[in-house]
Image: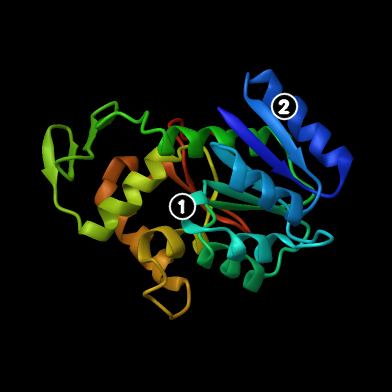
Amino acid sequence: MKILIVDDEEMIRQVIKEYCLKENYMVEEADSGKEALEKLQNNHYDLMILDIMMPKLDGFSMLSALPEEKRIPTIVLSARSEEMDKLKGFELGIDDYLTKPFSPKELLARIKAILNRTQKNIPNTYTLDTLEVDFLAYTLKIDGKLIKITPKEFELLSYFIKNKGIAISREQFLSKLWKYDYYGDDRTVDTHIKMLRNNLGKYKNHIVTVRGIGYKFVENEEE
């Protein structure tokens, strides 16, 4: 897998590069949106880690200028934590948004989750004890019994499982599952997750609330 790291701070690029190389990812760097745009138009990458505030061409402007056929999975890594910045990023098609300062290990976990998903290395079924999820048949079973849930609840559960162990923000849920067709407040996410938890019965505690961020799915309730 080949990753493009775009950030005007050399130290941050080097930290990310070091962690990526340990996982045997190939890495290239760009110190501005302008250089990144040139690289993306002339090379193939599997994922991009993108800063927003950069000289010559900022991250959002670079994404807007990038042709659709050249777009790749993208994680925004920015010191700007305002909700509007996150929403703008998701509207531009990014896959994740992580604020600085950040944990390199958490960033690496998010990189792996996105690459696994985009490379389609995810099995068609998922099992946790007596919980069985069939992604193709759109079915959920617990103790061998078919559990009736809404299509949106199933999408939520699938997204949780495919990103297990990773905290997911309400903005991400709205972007990936509602596609911004819903313009109310993000309490709709909380409502659907509450219903999903109720339907999961004895497995409801595997969906954990992450204070100040959103939710995550854990395989061990102690996590």
Q: Quadrant of residue 89?
A: bottom right
Residue 161: x %, y % from top left: 38, 39
Q: Quadrant of the N terminus?
A: top right
Disc ID at residue 19: 2
Q: Is 116 placed left or right of 127 in the picture?
A: right
Farthest residue toward the front? 42
The residue that mark 1 highlights is 69
Of pointers 2 and 1, the one earlier in the residue sequence: 2
Residue 94: x %, y % from top left: 54, 56
In this picture, is 67 found above or below 27?
below
Farthest residue toward the bottom? 184
Q: Counting other residues with Cα less than 10 Å from the Cα at mark 2, is it few (<14), some (14-19), or many (20 or more)?
A: some
Viewer-side residue, 45 vs 206: 45
Viewer-side residue, 135 vs 28: 28
Question: Quick check: can you spot residue 143?
Answer: yes
Farthest residue toward the left? 145
Residue type highlighted by circle 2: Tyr
Viewer-side residue, 102 vs 213: 102
